[in-house]
Image: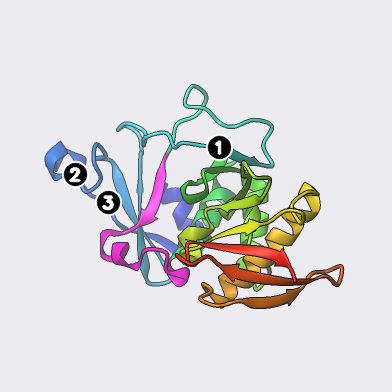
């Protein structure tokens, strides 16, 4: 890891604790004595699950992007990259998470045998090249990578609902029937709206937009504000 980071112009190891000097009770991350602190753009992030210690707990996965199948604990070991403890209060801070994702891109480029990148708020596993491509494009000013950093699932009533958007804005998105009947078109619409919401933030009142096909739509937050529904006007 030190050798890989030495090849990066913007990343560095800022702290490498001695596991032999710690007990499990003193571990910063439960059960993880082997970890390092990484510095990127003035912010620190912790990478745990390093050998010779145990791997990180394998994440729960429900969605996959650019992968033939969901990774399993039988095939892969997990490492965890997360904001350092002093950034914990930042929660879903966009600047903090953008920087962490930039660091993740840096690491992806250094390790060819990395199987996938997992984004836990969406329960998604993302192919390494797809992750690096869409995340780098977003960092450079492109659209938010809704396929990966969020996901979509079909609701029992036929709506198409986002998974993981709540991490970013505190609200999930629902494309309501009949807009959701064409799953491909509804997913494309959801991707555009999620980009709009990540830029603009959560909604506390109706918002009116025009779909790519010219259809006029209303984005309406639920009374409890946890969900934004999309309807035709």
Farthest right residue in view: 213
Left or right: 129 in relation to 81: right
Tell me where residue 99 appears, x and y as whole percent. 47, 66
Decide: few, some or many residues near mark 2? Use Cα within 10 Å; few <14, some 14-19, many ≥20: some
Q: Which of the two residues, 29 or 183, is positioned nearer the viewer here?
A: 183
List x then y, in percent, for residue 146.
Answer: 63, 58
Where residue 186 sits, quadrant-wise, is: bottom right
- Which residue is pictured at 63% across the width and 54% down the height? 132
Kindly identify the residue that appears in the image at 52 percent across and 48 percent down.
122
**Does 183 lie within the magenta span?**
no
The residue mark sitting in front, 2 or 3, is 2
Residue found at x 27% / y 51% = 16
Residue of label 2: 27
Looking at marks 2 and 3 on the same chain, the residue that comes earlier in the sequence is marked by 3
Q: Kindly indicate the quadrant of the structure image that contains residue 178.
A: bottom right
- In this view, the residue in front, 88 or 131, is 88
Give the labeled residue for mark 1. 62
For disc 1, the neighbor class at 10 Å (few under 14, some 14 to 19, many from 20) is: few
Give residue 41's position: percent from left, percent from top. 43, 71
In the image, 131: left or right of 57? Answer: right
Element marked by disc 1 = loop
Label for residue 188? none
Q: Which residue is mark 3?
A: 16
Residue visible at 38% across and 72% down in the picture: 42
Q: Which residues are magenta?
A: 79-96
């Amino acid at each position: 890891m030190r050798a890989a980071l030495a090849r990066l112009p913007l990343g560095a190891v800022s702290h490498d604790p001695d596991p032999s000097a710690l007990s499990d009770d003193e571990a910063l991350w439960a059960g993880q004595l082997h970890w390092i602190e990484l510095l990127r753009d003035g912010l620190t992030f912790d990478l745990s699950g390093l050998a010779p210690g145990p791997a990180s707990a394998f994440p729960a996965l429900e969605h996959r992007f650019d992968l033939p199948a969901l990774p399993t604990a039988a095939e892969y070991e997990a490492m965890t990259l997360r904001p350092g403890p002093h950034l914990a209060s930042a929660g879903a801070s966009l600047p903090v998470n953008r920087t962490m994702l930039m660091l993740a891109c840096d690491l992806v480029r250094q390790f060819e045998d990395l199987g996938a990148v997992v984004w836990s708020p969406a329960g998604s596993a993302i192919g390494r090249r797809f992750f690096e491509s869409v995340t780098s494009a977003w960092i450079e000013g492109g659209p938010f990578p809704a396929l990966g950093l969020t996901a979509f699932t079909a609701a029992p009533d036929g709506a198409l609902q986002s998974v993981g958007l709540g991490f970013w804005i505190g609200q999930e998105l629902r494309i309501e029937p009949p807009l959701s009947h064409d799953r491909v078109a509804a997913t494309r619409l959801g991707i555009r709206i999620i980009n709009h919401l990540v830029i603009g933030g959560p909604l506390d009142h109706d918002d009116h937009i025009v779909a790519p096909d010219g259809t006029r739509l209303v984005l309406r937050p639920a009374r409890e504000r946890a969900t934004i529904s999309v309807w035709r006007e």
